[in-house]
């Protein structure tokens, strides 16, 4: 019963780590850019979504590591709310990233 949601959370956790690594790399290289004006609400929401996803990922990883190493089986029930909310946080952040990040200026490829 708990096997499928556990796999879902692990999949989303891996996708979040990949996205948290790729967004700064692609912004730095110029493949992505922030959409909107300099201080627009969309730009602020994009940065806030990145910080929220980073915070939730680090917190969930730390809680999972602490529970695996030093706690018993009863501690997993206290983490159930965090496991249930994490995919929702990821989907909300991905939705904001879809509108807040645009492809950067790419050089034309010469054949």
Image (cartoon, rainbow, N blue to C red):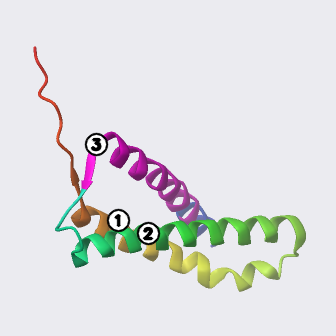
Number of other residues with Cα within 10 Å of mark 2, as a class: few under 14, some 14 to 19, many 20 or more: many
Determine if the magenta segment contains residue 98.
no
Q: Any mark on residue 65, and which?
A: none
Residue closest to the eye, 6 or 90: 90
Above or below 62: residue 72: below
Q: Percent x, y for residue 79? A: 69, 80
Disc 1, disc 2: CB below 8 Å? yes
Disc 2 or 3, which lies upstream in sequence?
A: 3
Residue at 30%, 69% (x, y): give it.
Answer: 95
- Residue 15 drawn in magenta: yes
Residue found at x 24% / y 78%? 41
Prevalent SS, magenta region: helix
Of the numbered discs in the image, which one, if any, rests on residue 30? 3
Label 3 sits on a secondary structure element that is loop
Query: Is 6 on the left or on the right of 98, as rendered?
Result: right
Residue at which label 1 appears: 94
Query: Alpha-carbon distance for marks 3 and 1?
Result: 20 Å
> Mark 1 to mark 2: distance in Å?
6 Å
Of the two numbered discs 3 and 1 on the same chain, state the one appearing first in sequence: 3
- Identity of the residue drawn at 20% across and 62% down: 35
Secondary structure found at label 2: helix
Residue at 13 percent across and 23 percent down: it is 109
What residue would you read off at disc 2?
90
Vertical position of residue 25 compared to residue 54: above or below: above
Report the magenta residues as a range.
Answer: 9-33
Q: Quadrant of the N terminus?
A: bottom right
Kindly indicate the quadrant of the structure image that contains residue 80.
bottom right
How many neighbours does mark 3 have within 10 angstroms: few (below 14), some (14-19), or many (20 or more)?
few
Q: Are marks 3 and 1 in contact (CB under 8 Å)?
A: no
Horizontal arrangement in the rendering, residue 108 relative to residue 24 (left or right):
left
Q: Locate residue 13 relative to residue 63 in the image: left or right.
A: left
Residue in front for this viewpoint, 1 or 21: 21
């Amino acid at each position: 019963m708990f096997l499928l949601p556990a796999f879902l959370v692990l999949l989303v956790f891996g996708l979040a780590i990949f996205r948290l690594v790729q967004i700064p790399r692609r912004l730095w290289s110029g493949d992505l850019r922030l959409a909107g004006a300099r201080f627009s609400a969309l730009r602020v929401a994009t940065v806030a979504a990145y910080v929220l996803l980073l915070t939730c990922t680090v917190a969930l990883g730390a809680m999972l590591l602490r529970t695996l190493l030093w706690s018993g089986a009863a501690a997993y029930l206290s983490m159930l709310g965090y496991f249930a909310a994490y995919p929702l946080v990821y989907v909300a952040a991905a939705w904001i990233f879809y509108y807040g990040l645009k492809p950067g200026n790419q050089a034309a490829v010469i054949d």
